[in-house]
Amino acid sequence: MPSDQTLSHPAAMLQQARRIVVKVGSSLVTNEGRGLDEQAIGEWCRQLAALRAEGREVIMVSSGAVAEGMKRLGWQTRPRELNELQAAAAVGQMGLAQMYETKLRENGLASAQVLLTHADLADRERYLNGRSTLVTLLELGVLPVINENDTVVNDEIKFGDNDTLGALVANLVEADLLVILTDQKGLFSADPRKHPDATLVAVGQAGDPALEAMAGGAGSAVGTGGMLTKILAAKRAAGSGASTVIAWGREPDALLRLVQGEVVGTVLVAPTQKLQARKQWMKDHLKLHGSVVVDAGAAAMLQQGGKSLLPIGMTEVQGEFRRGEVIAVRNPEGVEIARGLANYSSYEARQLCRKPSSQFEALLGYSAEPEMVHRDNMVLSR
Ligand SMILES: Nc1ncnc2c1ncn2[C@@H]1O[C@H](COP(=O)(O)OP(=O)(O)O)[C@@H](O)[C@H]1O
Ligand SMILES: N[C@@H](CCC(=O)OP(=O)(O)O)C(=O)O
């Protein structure tokens, strides 16, 4: 549970956020459907560059492809046919990517376009691939700009829900903070478009069912998820220990003020810390598929050194598993000391036992990660 201290004073949590996912909705990005809002995108990119300069890692999740595509195709009303929505998304995504690339470059940042589907993140192997690509981009100082891959899926444009994608990305990279920028100042006690006397919620606990009751559907013609998907996204993000902020996208310096500890909009604090959340997730969601036995040196590196497991320390591979499945790591006595996601299948792992990474390419025919289980995907057993 967040301490009462964090709930009443979330400043320290905001200041300490190192890895941040920022999501902006269609209505903001496209000026309520009137076309890409160059000034607003430029403003966010300026702030993102400032966050990077402070050493924080940032990922942008941006909607707006359908709305921009409709404008480019001269469509006044949102089509009902899914294939037309998908076509509009394909047209609009070109403009969206181009605009972010230009504005980020103006602020000295390299960018990358990443199009994802929910199914990509549900599949264990693709999850690892997606995670490793995003983490590599962050390490390279490149800012990933993510949207749904609308060409091949249509659930998202049907339900219009990039808020969920933002939360899934926060889960994927184990972000500290998810910031959802929208066209309202935050979560109000009721939809402010219908209830002008509604009051702004400053701080709450992610996952609190009372918040869901306050949230209504979308208020604009281009936004689709409304506040409920944002509240549910906060709950989902909290599953990996990320807190969520819902704030107005045109609030001056919103991102910069947040990381200085100011409560801007609505701050929904995650009830569990990242490490606890990761342990819980491994326990709840994943079935154990096999084990690797390691030598005493490797066991010590894991238990005391805080290191990843390298194949050179492995002595035996037990059971059959695929890349991305959960395996146990056992010490020479057979006692489980850790659990984590395997970077290699059991077939590959048997070839890599006791081998240094310099030989992986010759043994497997391709070069891949030096670790059998990366530290970020591992929890120590007690
Ligand atoms: N309790 C609430 N507080 C604030 N906004 C709400 C609430 N309930 C519903 N809304 C509506 O949600 C809209 C934001 O969602 P949406 O239009 O999907 O935006 P976006 O494109 O940013 O995802 C607001 O314009 C507002 O009308
Ligand atoms: N991925 C699509 C739709 C996503 C969407 O509508 O989300 P949102 O505006 O955040 O509620 C797009 O870029 O238009």
Image: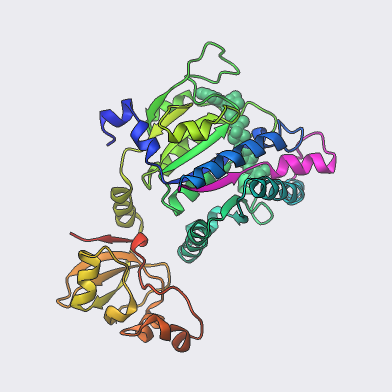
Q: Quick check: 360 above or below 54? A: below
Ligand 2 position by quadrant: top right
The residue under the point 56% across, 34% down is 181
Q: Quadrant of the C terminus?
A: bottom left
Residue 308 is one of the magenta-drawn residues? no
Q: x, y (%) of residue 343?
A: 41, 71
In the rendered image, which quarter is residue 335 located in?
A: bottom left
Residue 67 included in the magenta stretch of the image: yes
Q: Is residue 46 visible?
A: yes
Query: Which of these two is toward me, 211 or 259?
Result: 259
State the extent of the magenta-drawn residues as a range. 55-82
- Determine which quarter of the picture holds residue 34: top right
Q: Is residue 286 left or right of residue 35?
A: left
Specify whether 359 is left or right of 108.
left
Residue lying at the far right in this picture: please name it.
74
Residue 131 x, y percent position in the rendering:
48, 59
In the image, what residue occupies the spot 83% across and 43% down? Answer: 73
